[in-house]
Image (cartoon, rainbow, N blue to C red):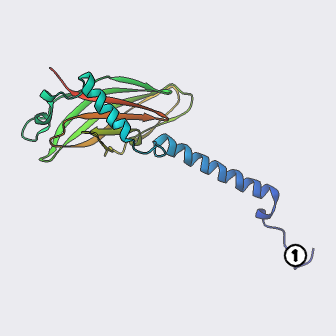
């Protein structure tokens, strides 16, 4: 071999090119899966919020006129809230709402904390994070402020707390849970006790 010739770079070999292409495909696929699970590909749907609001009105669920605005006023103690259902299954996951706490945070807002257990019925790990939750406050979606970010191993469960800021004077609260392509809406009602 002469001094002027060098061995070709690994980029110029077929195995090198195939390795690079496979790595790129794997990275893009992983990114798209994470974005899809987070619900970012679907975006906000006003139809879902309007449908939830309409079903609450027609079924008499949610915060009725007697339990509305005055219950979320800062000059009173925060009312006790209960979910209209305590468990929901979405795909291969079950979400159990363990506890709901509403506490005054400032003269303008309340802190809403929802203790949630996610049980995985899949053999694969699943994300359990803030991106799966939204709170519709008077039909306006609000993101959590809790930074929940866990991974639930296959066939196991994890507990976490999702927190939201609720403005004073809110009349209706509906928790939205998204898991992969499925969505559930759970009205939070004033406790009658």
Residue at (51% x, 32% y) in the render: 153
- Of the pair 172 and 108, the residue shown nearer to us: 172
Q: Quadrant of the N terminus?
A: bottom right
- Answer left or right for 136 relative to 152: left
**Residue 191 pos. (x, y %):** 18, 24
Q: Residue furthest right?
A: 1
Task: Examine the rendered structure and indicate whether residue 159 appears above or below residue 38.
Answer: above
**Residue 160 pos. (x, y %):** 36, 35
- Answer left or right for 114 relative to 157: left
Can residue 169 be seen here? The reply is yes
Q: Residue furthest left?
A: 75
Q: Which quadrant of the view contains residue 129?
A: top left
Density class for disc 1 (Cα within 10 Å; few <14, some 14-19, many ≥20) is few
- Answer left or right for 115 relative to 153: left
- Of the pair 5 and 118, the residue shown nearer to us: 118
Q: Which quadrant of the view contains residue 69?
A: top left
**Residue 57 pos. (x, y %):** 25, 27
Q: Residue furthest top?
A: 193
Residue at (11% x, 39% y) in the render: 73
**Residue 105 pos. (x, y %):** 17, 44
Residue beneath disc 1: 5
Q: Name the secondary structure under disc 1.
A: loop
Q: Quadrant of the C terminus?
A: top left
Residue at (76% x, 63% y) in the render: 11
- Of the pair 181 and 6, the residue shown nearer to us: 181
Can residue 83 be seen here? The reply is no
- Of the pair 31 and 151, the residue shown nearer to us: 31
Label count reads: 1
Residue at (60% x, 50% y) in the render: 28
């Amino acid at each position: 071999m002469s001094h002027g010739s060098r061995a070709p770079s690994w980029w110029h070999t077929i195995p090198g090119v195939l390795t690079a292409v496979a790595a790129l495909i794997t990275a893009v696929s992983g990114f798209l899966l994470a974005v899809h699970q987070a619900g970012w590909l679907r975006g906000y749907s006003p139809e879902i919020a309007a449908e939830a609001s309409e079903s609450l009105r027609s079924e008499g669920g949610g915060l009725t006129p007697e339990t509305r605005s005055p219950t979320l006023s800062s000059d009173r103690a925060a009312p006790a809230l209960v979910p209209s259902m305590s468990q929901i299954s979405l795909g291969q996951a079950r979400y159990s709402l363990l506890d709901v706490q509403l506490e005054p945070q400032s003269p303008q807002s309340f802190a809403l904390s929802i203790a949630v257990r996610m049980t995985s019925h899949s053999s694969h790990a699943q994300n359990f994070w803030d991106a799966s939750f939204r709170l519709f406050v008077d039909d306006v979606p609000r993101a959590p402020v809790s930074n929940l970010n866990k991974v639930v191993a296959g066939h196991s469960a994890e507990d976490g707390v999702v927190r939201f800021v609720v403005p004073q004077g809110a009349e209706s609260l509906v928790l939205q849970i998204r898991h992969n392509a499925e969505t559930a809406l759970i009205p939070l009602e004033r406790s009658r006790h």
